[in-house]
Amino acid sequence: MFRKRHLLQCRRVQGPAAIAALALALSGCGRLGASLPVNLYVAVGLEDTNVISESNHRFFRERVAIAVKEFRRLNPSIHVQLALYPESSLVERIERRNAADLGPDVILSDAYMAKTLYKAKLTTSIPFDKELEANIFSSMLQRVTGADRQIVAQPFVLYLQLACFNRRALPQPPRTTQDLLRISAGGKNFGLSYDSAQIFWTAGSQGALPALNRIEQNQPITPQDRDSITAWLAWLQQAAAQQRIQFFANEMELKLGLQKRELDWITCSSADVEELKAKLGDDLGVSALPHGPWHAASPPNRLRVLSLGENSSPRQRNAAITLMDYLLQPQVQRNLTLRSLSFLPANRHVRVPIKSSSILQAMVTSRKQSAAASEFLNHFNLNKKLRSGMTTILTPLIFGINTPEESSDNLILFLANARQ
């Protein structure tokens, strides 16, 4: 492949002189475009606005544009064009551009979409080396490893699931799921979602994750496993029966309720923090999700990754890898993180100053919860069909139509069939 090894060697640079050293290293090692210019076409996949608001899209685009601008100062011969596409039509759009020999050189998307693109032969695998493995969290690399054991995309940043609350109405957030029920019974308004991806964190809190993990691994489940899943679902139904706990269809509705101060506490994405801060100001509080009596929460997270397009010339491929290596540099990743406070870096060597920010502290806690939440969570993060099917089962449970026992049977059967 065309990978430039010099940039990986420069990743070790840290400390106050990191930026200057990085600039020197890149200018000295990366003579990629010292002669002729090269054009890079970068396709940015965006989630549906029902999930991520337009303001969040704009905020993310601005951060990416800043990083690209700084990259071009060091690599002026590489011209970068950003184009935005809905992820729902990303495969179709790239197929059309490839047919016209105008396909993207780099694609920025969610990890699930990156696997879809690779399976459709619209992207090529990432040149692998030991430093890539050493620099990126192993749980992230697992999520971008294809069935052929190739790395299909390079992790970029990680969005986390958190709790957002109105500090004026709720000075201290619930630390446990028992606290959540108790505080809501005392008159505070809580918002949850019946979207399985948004409520899955409670499976960990209520101790159902080991049983779910056994199903995902195609292992036989015991009566105790079935009981633990039923107990989790019973807790969800108990929460839904509370007068002050409301369930909504999606994250956007939750966020709107907090912005209007109709809700005092919601589950949220780290991508929402900037927008909520603009509305609530210093009243916005952010924390990790509550744990259960004996178990930690299991929040899913959203991994954004960079893929290599299949339609590049050798010079464009070199330039694309140069850009991707730059975006993985510790100092670049740290700057992106601290500018936004909306995501965490994929580079494991970046020191996140959690003592200086409760938001960063909550995100790091969420990342640890997610990383420790077993292989089922990786499978869940990647499979949107699984998410839809689980939501169909959980919705009638939450609204009191089906019993926890019925829903447990339905969920176990669904997951077993999905695994096969």
Image (cartoon, rainbow, N blue to C red):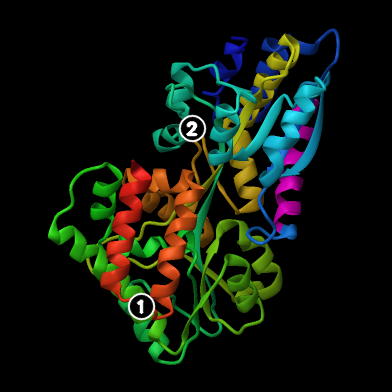
Q: Nearer the viewer, residue 16 or 308?
A: 308
Report helix, strand or loop for mark 2.
loop
- Quadrant location of the N terminus? top right
Toward which corner of the image does residue 49 lie, by quadrant? bottom right
Would you place residue 131 above or below residue 409 in this image? above
Would you place residue 247 above or below residue 116 in this image? below
Q: Which mark is residue 133?
A: none
| Labels 1 & 2 near each other (Cβ < 8 A) | no
Q: Nearer the viewer, residue 143 or 281?
A: 143
Residue at 38 percent of width and 46 percent of height = 418
Magenta-drawn segment: 56-73
Q: Earlier in the sequence, mark 1 or mark 2?
A: 2
Residue under label 1: 237
Could you tell me residue 370's position as x and y percent? 39, 50
- Residue 305 left/right relative to 419: right
- Residue 142 left/right relative to 87: left
Magenta stretch prevailing secondary structure: helix
**Residue 69 part of the magenta-drawn span:** yes
Q: Amino acid at mark 2?
A: Val
- Quadrant location of the C terminus? top left
Residue at 65 percent of width and 23 percent of height = 22
Could you tell me residue 41's position as x and y percent? 78, 27
Could you tell me residue 18's position as x and y percent? 61, 29
Could you tell me residue 123's position as x and y percent? 62, 24
Label 2 CA crowd tier, 10 Å (few <14, some 14–19, many 20+): many
Would you place residue 211 above or below residue 133 in this image? below
Residue under label 2: 144
Residue 361 seen by the camera: no
Label 1 CA crowd tier, 10 Å (few <14, some 14–19, many 20+): many
